[in-house]
Image (tube, helix red, strand yellow):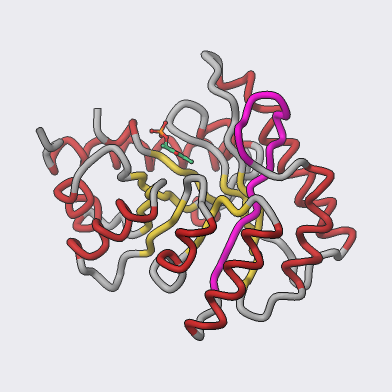
Amino acid sequence: MATSRQIIAGNLESVRSRMADACRRSTRDASSVRLVAVTKAVGGDEAKSLVELGALDLGENRVPDGIAKMDALDDESVRWHMIGHLQRRKVRHAVGRFAMLHSVDSVRLLDEIEKRSAAAGVVTDILAEVNVSAEEAKYGLQPGEAPSFCEAAARCDNVRLSGLMTMAPFVDDPEDARHVFSALRELLEGLNGQSACSQKLSELSMGMTNDFEVAIEEGATIVRIGTALYC
Ligand SMILES: *Cc1c(COP(=O)(O)O)cnc(C)c1O
């Protein structure tokens, strides 16, 4: 059964206020963190409720599901984020439809996005997914591969690399994920210092239901939250 708009409204308000509290604790401006409301586990009704409630950044982890929902919702004001593992053969469907691809984790995939974006006459915003917790995550660049990935992205005319994304391992105590988030921030600062990238990286997409407050304290500019909005 669909989660009612009323329940989503209460949850959204609570998530937003927890985000604001985390910003206050870390002396950050509340406007410096964007919420991507993840709709992968819910249907079109919940997505519609979110949009009516002003959550205009929506996240999906599979390209066909995302496209089905964006077609059903048919609302130009929504920015769709592709947050899950992206397969090369799905790139041509994703380009031009998603506002941002969060999970680009190889130069091969980058090249495909460049090729398809050029063909479509668009510039695609991407993030590089980095596996900073080595053994745990399935996908992502190794931190040591990030500089050469940035250099490859700098050569692309139709791709704009605007930051980094990571998935922290699932832990009971979100404090145990803090080092993952700080490592991603330090990697971004290091890349900006090396000027491997054509433009300064500004986005850090990190933090989910279980750990978003810690991620904000460590510098997240985008949090991706699903579960907390629907329960
Ligand atoms: C599902 C998902 C999320 C949201 O997770 P919740 O724990 O439901 O908040 C965030 N990021 C990615 C990549 C996901 O697949």
For this rendering, which residue is in front, 105 or 165? Answer: 105
Which is more toward the observer, 60 or 201?
A: 60
Q: Position of residue 24 (x, y in %)?
A: 55, 40
- Residue situated furthest bottom in the rendering: 121
Q: How far across and down, in percent of the image, does residue 201 sit? A: 71, 61
Residue drawn where x is 51% and y is 81% of the image: 122
**In the drawing, does residue 139 fall left or right of residue 143?**
left
Across and down, in percent, residue 55 comes to: 31, 54
Q: Nearer the viewer, residue 228 or 170?
A: 170
Query: Within the image, what quadrant is residue 135 found in?
Result: top right
- Residue at 38% from the left image edge and 64% from the top image edge: 79
Q: Residue at x 71, y 28 (%)?
A: 179
Is 125 included in the stretch rendered in magenta? Answer: yes
Residue lying at 33% horizontally and 31% vertically, measured from the top left: 228
Q: Is 24 displayed left or right of 10 in the figure?
A: right
- Relative to 140, say whether 34 is above or below: below
Q: Quadrant of residue 227?
A: top left
Q: Quadrant of the C terminus?
A: top left
If the image is split into quadrants, where does the N terminus sit?
A: top left
Residue 229 occupies quadrant: top left
Of residues 213 and 99, the one nearer the viewer is 99
Provide residue 25's location: percent of width, then percent of height. Answer: 58, 35
Q: Residue pushed farthest front? A: 89
Q: Which residues are magenta?
A: 124-139
Q: Main secondary structure of the magenta part?
A: loop
Q: How many marks?
A: 0
**Which corner quadrant of the figure contains ligand 1?**
top left
79 in magenta = no
